[in-house]
Amino acid sequence: MFELDTTPQPPIRIWSRGIKLGLASFRRLFALASALGFISLLPAIYLAWKMGDNPITPDAMLQMLRQGYFALNFLLLELLVLVLSSLINALIIQRLDRAAQGAAMVHELQFALRKTATLVLAGILFFITLLIGIFIADIIGTLLGALLGTMLGHGATVVVIRVCLIVAIMFIVVNLLFFQFAIVLDGKGPVSALNHSCALVFHNWWHSFLVLLMIVAAIVGIVVVVMLPFMHWLPLLAAADTGRALMEKSVLRLVGAAIFTPFVVGVLYVLYHDLKTRRAQKSTATGAVQA
């Protein structure tokens, strides 16, 4: 049984405890993580099959999108990915929670199937929210860029727009990161799960971001160390994508997803409970003051 902390912890403690939980659950989650990685690659596989050895350029993509069947097939494929990935994410979170509590794995598939529709709806709402945030950030970035562009030139405009977009995406993603945990572990609905995630991250955004930054830094560091013996392949991997090159990169991403997903979900699981603890203590303190 995995002992969760009952008091708020610093980022390094959350990260290390999450890695420990991921390591303890690795064998239980590896197959699901591999399946999740493969499912997420289905759009790339379809695109690689359609493009073959032709370079994937904006013009080539525009020509493909003008073919109605391609856009429809790609949209349906993305919807299939959302449904299947929601099912597998429910299985992963449930299995990790059972492992942390030392409980037996019973009726996993039935439980995950009951959560899938809610996860799909919440995923669609998440995507819509992200699009709205990007749209607003683009407008703000364009206005700010226009002001700075008159003084610093066109390059400043491009930089300001990109910074605004990156900040908006990071802010929204971190705020809504835990909606799947809220649905699977706490039985929230699509809208309430997104609101619950925002409420947990509220006043703890930088704390959450720092934990996520540590995850990214660890993954990047491991990948760099592993890739050092294959430095002569890097120019090939960085070259313009063709259908064949996209498939090769997809295989590498699949391997990465299978290896790293148990640890990433483990850290997020511990962080989710840490944020719940912080909110509970804040609510208790506020209630005591009011009393």
Image (cartoon, helix red, strand yellow):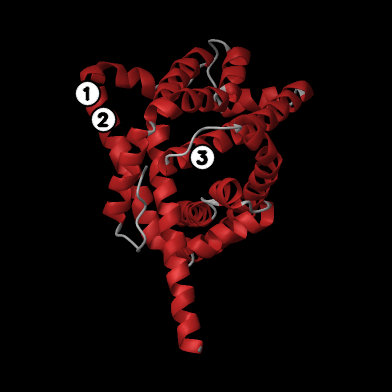
Amino acid at pointer 2: Val
> Nearer the observer, disc 3 or disc 2?
3
**What is the C-alpha distance between the residues marked 1 and 2?**
6 Å
Left or right of residue 244: residue 186 = right
- Which of the pair 137/74 is nearer the observer? 74
Q: Is residue 165 visible?
A: yes
- Residue behind mark 2: 224
- Residue behind mark 3: 93
Name the residue rendered at 35%, 63% in the picture. Answer: 8
Report x, y in % for residue 16.
28, 46
Q: Secondary structure at mark 3?
A: helix
Q: Judge the density around disc 3: few (<14), some (14-19), many (≥20) Cα neighbours within 10 Å.
A: many
**What is the C-alpha distance between the residues marked 3 and 2?**
28 Å
- Which of the pair 186/158 is nearer the observer? 186
Whether the residues at callouts 3 and 2 have beta carbons within 8 Å, the answer is no
Report x, y in % for residue 177.
51, 50
Left or right of residue 115: residue 210 = left
Whether the residues at callouts 1 and 2 have beta carbons within 8 Å, the answer is yes
Report x, y in % for residue 148.
45, 64
Name the residue rendered at 69%, 45% in the picture. Answer: 118
Does 270 appear above or below 202?
above
- Which of the pair 173/232 is nearer the observer? 173
| The quadrant where residue 267 appears | top left
Amino acid at pointer 1: Leu
**What is the C-alpha distance between the residues marked 3 and 1?**
33 Å
Q: Which mark is residue 228?
A: 1
Name the residue rendered at 35%, 40% in the picture. Answer: 21
